[in-house]
Amino acid sequence: MNTLTTIEDLTIAKRHFRGKPEPQGPRLNGQIRAQQIRLIKPDNSHELTTPERGMQLAEMYNLDLVEISPNATPPVCKIIDYGKYQYEKKKKEKEAKKKQHTVSVKELRFRPNTDDHDLEFKTRHAREFLEAGDKVKASVQFRGRDMLYTEKGELLLLRLAKSLEDVAKIESKPNMEGRRMIMILTPTK
């Protein structure tokens, strides 16, 4: 019977039980395990070869052998400068992140007895939010005896939707959630 006696034995056993973690990112140079690879040289010529031959060519060019497409049959490897490859990849990701627009939800709050002027003022804000590409969550808060006037709140939200119908559509119709009536508008573009 095998017993674990030292701390080293325990850590080795734990590591063996969990398995080795897969390295993050593409495999480089000696980490490539395939029998045969499709090699792309710096002059963009292709060749089917072994990883050992690819390593020799990479050393000849003073560059790295990087596995670009590990799931292809055979895996595609390229002879490139890995540091430059990582830099350009991060740069592209940063550019893509700059260009994407996250849709946020802007909230407008009303009371059942909101005046026309206040409604117009908040409608202008809602229009700005919708034109910027954001969703608008309009809610009417009912307190105490205001719960008797839920139809006033619904009419208020429908008036808001009617005045914004050229830039928005109703995603969810007015519905009660506790003491609040909520409606969500999304931009039409």
Image (cartoon, rainbow, N blue to C red):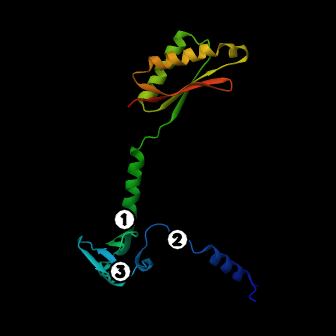
Q: Eyeballing the image, is 6 above or below 160?
A: below
Residue at 43 percent of width and 40 percent of height: 101
Instruction: Find numbered disc 1 in the image and state the secondary structure of the residue it sits on.
Output: helix
Q: Looking at this view, is 147 or 65 the one in front?
A: 147
Instruction: Name the side, left or right, on which 75 lies relative to 135.
Output: left
* Occupied quadrant, residue 109: top right
Task: State how far apart marks 1 and 2 are (Cα).
Answer: 20 Å
In this figure, which residue is indicated by the disc labeled 3? 36
- Please rate how many residues cluster around mark 3, counting C-alpha atoms within 10 Å: few if below 14, some from 14 to 19, many from 20: some
Task: State how far apart marks 3 and 2 are (Cα).
Answer: 21 Å
Instruction: Find numbered disc 2 in the image and state the secondary structure of the residue it sits on.
Output: loop
In this figure, which residue is indicated by the disc labeled 1? 85
Circles 1 and 3, Cβ within 8 Å, touching? The answer is: no
Residue 114: numbered disc? none
Q: How many numbered callouts?
A: 3
N-terminal of the pair, mark 1 or mark 3, is: 3
Name the residue type under label 3. Answer: Gln
Q: Looking at this view, is 121 or 170 the one in front?
A: 170
Q: Eyeballing the image, is 119 above or below 105?
A: above
Residue 54 percent location from the top left of the image = 33, 80
* Occupied quadrant, residue 78: bottom left
In this figure, which residue is indicated by the disc labeled 2? 22
- Please rate how many residues cluster around mark 2, counting C-alpha atoms within 10 Å: few if below 14, some from 14 to 19, many from 20: few
Name the residue type under label 2. Answer: Glu
